[in-house]
Image (cartoon, helix red, strand yellow):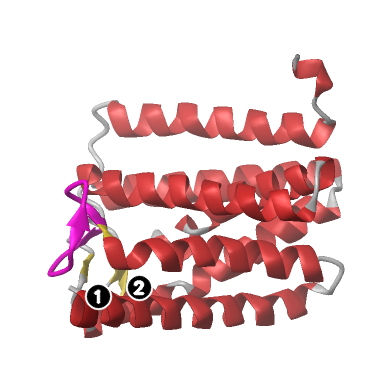
Amino acid sequence: MFQKFSKKDKDFIIVHLIFITVCILILSLPIPLPIGIKLFILVIVYNLLVALVGLIRKDKGWIKLWFFTLMISVFQIFPDWFLSAELNILIFPEDGLFKIGTVSGYMLGLWAIPLFMICFIGLKVEELSSKRKGFITVTVCSLLIFGIAEQSMWLLNSWYPQSVTLIFDHLAIYIILPEILLGLSTFYFYSREKSKKMWILIIYAFIIMILYLGNASFFFFLIEKIIL
């Protein structure tokens, strides 16, 4: 069955199998490092793995998608900073790593991990089927990946919500739609503008961050202040 995948598909699978193995080793072994540094190492490992594969394969599409999602991740510092410093509904506890404002430093590259995965899968479905099914796939993947992350990261003493309505004990209701829309907007802009130059993708990455910041603020106000 593995033979039916394209070379790029195999690279995607192998990269994520390697990354999962590294995650298990770093997070489970009794390595005397603070959790913030461990997560920072994992973020670096993932981004280096993806970038190196793209460079070795000389795959411009792969490299552009990685670069685009990494730029979004860098800009995502601002919404996280706003939610934690101004609204005080997101907490980044002391984790042994440097902070940018109130946000732990590993967040600079962490968002690239789910966004690269979501967009790669969405583009593959779009290629094999249709644009509509690509968007449906991205919606489902965004819900599952971001939902699982929000529900589980507290176990690592990473970020967690406070003073908001939760489901399943740790998932903030207000952030569900903004994160789905983040996945959709990333997929939409990349699939539409992937032929553009790198610097233009940086502009779109900034726009996506602004959209996410607005969505997070709006749905927080709507859900926490009006509905609930």
Q: From this viewpoint, is residue 37 visible?
A: yes
Q: Which mark is residue 80?
A: 2
In front of the other: 18 or 30: 18
- The residue lying at 24 percent from left, 44 percent from top is 156
- The residue lying at 42 percent from left, 47 percent from top is 41
Q: Residues within 10 Å of mark 1 (few under 14, many from 20)?
A: many
Q: Which residue of the protein is positioned furthest toward the left in this rendering?
A: 163
Where in the figure is residue 154, as x and y percent of width and height?
Answer: 22, 48
In the image, taking residue 177 as reference, residue 10 lies left or right, namely right
Identified by mark 1, the residue type is Ser
Q: Residue 81's image quarter?
A: bottom left
Where in the figure is residue 162, as x and y percent of width and height?
Answer: 15, 66
In front of the other: 52 or 226: 226
Compared with residue 101, is residue 159 higher up or lower down, i.e. above or below? Answer: above
Where in the figure is residue 125, as x and y percent of width and height?
Answer: 74, 43
In the image, taking residue 83 as reference, residue 61 lies left or right, namely right
Q: Residue 160's image quarter?
A: bottom left
Residue at mark 1 = 84
- The residue lying at 71 percent from left, 58 percent from top is 65
Q: Which residue of the protein is positioned furthest toward the front in this rendering?
A: 227
Q: Is residue 41 magenta?
A: no
In the image, taking residue 56 as reference, residue 181 lies left or right, namely left
Given contact means CB atoms under 8 Å apart, are the residues at marks 2 and 1 in contact? yes
Identified by mark 2, the residue type is Asp
Where in the figure is residue 7, as x and y percent of width and height?
Answer: 83, 31
Per the rendered image, the range of residues in magenta is 159-171
**SS under mark 2:** helix
